[in-house]
Image: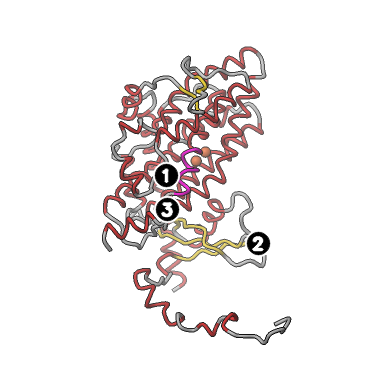
Amino acid sequence: MTEEKFQKRIDAEQKIEPKDWMPDAYRKHLIRQISQHAHSEVIGMQPEGNWVTRAPSLRAKMILLAKIQDEAGHGLYLYSACETLGISRDELVQQLHDGKAKYSSIFNYPTLNWADMGAVGWLVDGAAIVNQVSLQRTSYGPYSRGMVRICKEESFHQRQGYEIMATMAAGTPEQKQMAQDALNRIWWPSIMMFGPHDADSPRSGNALKWKIKRQTNDELRQSFIDKTVAQAELIGLTIPDPDLKWNEETGHYDFGAMDWDEFWRVVKGDGPCNKQRLDHHKKAHKEGEWVRNAAKAYAKKQELLTV
Amino acid sequence: MSENTDVWEVFIQSKNGLPHKHAGNVHATDKEMALQNARDLYTRRKEGSSIWVVKATDIIASQSEESEEFFDPSDDKMYRHPTFYTMPEGSKNI
Ligand SMILES: [Fe+2]
Ligand SMILES: [Fe+2]
């Protein structure tokens, strides 16, 4: 099949399945995007895992554990989707360890106190949902089906975070201040999760043409900001952007300039927790090696017994 | 020892009486582990009442490139469908 025929299928909103012909660049783009997405789900468990043993109540602890377990599941759905493109799970993990594959920069920021669990669920999962809802319509079948499954599970993540923020904002002045401080720190990195401005995003062209992405970075970011402002106002918190203003003409919020220098510094490895996150993943992977080996040895033995 | 573990395809019956439907896959070294992983990954919210796991390498699939020839024996057999038949004017309950 030619590239032209492939594009016709895309334009007709047909899903591409693993065994269908696809351009090499389409396959490569998908592997990069889906693996980055999978790694983000997995690394994203670390900042939240930091607070499991210090959750303020048993209810809070059970919720946090359930959320983190969901994120592990999201990582697995996405690795599965990525493997259908002809790359093995081991290669994917190796690329992460070698720094060849990235994950979302937001997880290179520390979670300093319990209010951060609220801000992360509300804003980080909130931003992820906007992106993932859009990706349910991606052109690659396995990726699209993974997104549908993930979106069903995500909404509790955002709601539990917003509930924490609302509770703290309605608490003592110190608690309200903690919630405001978490919002102040996490707001800008969370709106930068959508990536660079469309004008500075060289790969977006193909991704949109092939319908891997259905909306641009700036469109997704705007829709997240438009949704979130009223939620902050409702619980009496202030979004830390003096330029944030409703624009009657466009029907959207205008907002201030993002610090892209910081964004690229963190992407390139110089964030507060980059090294810690990757080291922890490598350590956990290495420490699990004997378990994987034992499981394989056990399976071999069972096979011999049944022959 | 090679790191790659077997891939198992997972089929879930959401309710008693319904067919098992493909949900996704898991990695596992043996059948019990495959079932447990499938339960933990695909039924955290009561999505299932029964799970089947099948080694992915044991599944025989038709080829999508050859699907036209493969399925064409049924193309010209409209008489297998009830709409093929003309019923006499006024007939009921048939
Ligand atoms: Fe997730
Ligand atoms: Fe989430």
Label number found at residue A80: 3
Residue at the (55%, 53%) spot, across then down: B42
Label number found at residue B15: 2
What type of secondary structure mainly makes up the magenta span? helix
* Rendered position, A160 above or below A11: above
Q: Is residue B1 visible?
A: no
Q: Position of residue A224 (x, y in %)?
A: 50, 32
* Rendered position, A55 above or below B74: above
Q: Is residue B50 magenta?
A: no
Q: Is residue A73 visible?
A: yes
Residue at the (66%, 67%) spot, across then down: B17
Q: Pinpoint the chain carrying mark 2.
A: B
The residue sitting at the bottom extreme is B88
Residue situated in front as seen by the camera: A73 or A50: A73
Q: Are marks 1 and 3 in contact (CB under 8 Å)?
A: no
* Rendered position, A234 above or below A81: above
**Stretch of the chain drawn in magenta:** A130-137
Label number found at residue A214: 1
**Element at label 1:** loop
> Count of labels shown?
3
The residue sitting at the front extreme is B89
Q: Amino acid at mark 1?
A: Arg
Name the side, left or right, on which A11 lies relative to A137. left
Q: Position of residue B81 (x, y in %)?
A: 56, 81
Tell me how far mark 1 sits from mark 3, CA to CA.
22 Å
